[in-house]
Image (spheres, helix red, strand yellow):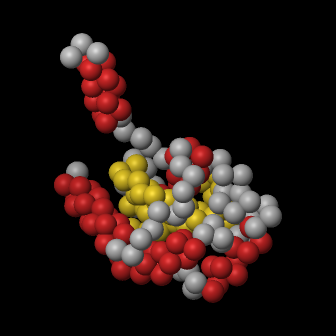
Amino acid sequence: MMRLLPLLLIVALSFGQEKNLPKVNLKDMKNKTHSLNKLVDGQVTLINFWATYCVPCRKEMKHLNRINKTYADQNVQVIGISIDDSRTVGRVKSMVKSQKLKYTILLDTEQKLYKNFNTSAMPFSILVDAQGKILWEHTGYLPGDEVQMESEIKKALAAQKKS
């Protein structure tokens, strides 16, 4: 029991810590720099990391497009962040066009932001509240995951109304 106590304390402390979106600037496809924190300020935001060579990412995109459209009038947005590196980033524009993506797309070609989340799987999504606090993280995509995404968005909207 005594050996278990420090472990329980560490687990309890890690659950109590709030994580905020790191302050970072990213470029868009027109090479314009944006502060991610300014983009999310005041809106519930679903941030989705993806790459052109990721098949599950492409399957998820139509759902992200729909979520972005469905919740736009409720102060919710989707931001896609491509983690394609300098060798594959040239494919991003045609992917965005072919998928008819209507949400903001940013580039993290050096994966500086992506690496903050200690994941190597894609797609990888995080949901942040209007103040930039990370509420939820999700790795991968299987059909039906979009239902959970919408559920988390609805929870975030309900919590926002209470505060």
Q: Is residue 33 left or right of residue 160?
A: right
In this rendering, the count of numbered labels is 0
Q: Residue furthest top?
A: 2
Q: In this view, does 84 lie to the left or right of 116?
A: right
Q: Which residue is drawn at 25% across and 18% down?
A: 5
Q: Position of residue 145 (x, y in %)?
A: 36, 69
Q: In this view, does 58 lie above or below 110?
A: below
Q: In this view, does 50 lie to the left or right of 60?
A: right
Q: Which residue is drawn at 35% across and 32% down?
A: 14
Q: Residue furthest right?
A: 87
In which image quadrant can residue 142 be found? Answer: bottom left
Q: Where is residue 67 in the image (x, y as percent from the top left)?
A: 39, 76
Q: Residue at x 57, y 74 (%)?
A: 55
Quadrant where the image shows the N terminus:
top left
**Whether residue 118 can be seen here:** yes
**Whether residue 157 can be seen here:** no
Q: Is residue 77 above or below residue 129?
A: below
**Nearer the observer, 41 or 147:** 147
**Nearer the observer, 53 or 20:** 53
Q: Position of residue 70 (x, y in %)?
A: 36, 80
Q: Is residue 18 above or below residue 134?
A: above
Q: Position of residue 113 (x, y in %)?
A: 60, 49
**Nearer the observer, 87 or 92:** 87
Q: Residue at x 57, y 85 (%)?
A: 100
In which image quadrant can residue 144 be found? Answer: bottom left
Q: Is residue 130 above or below residue 142?
A: above
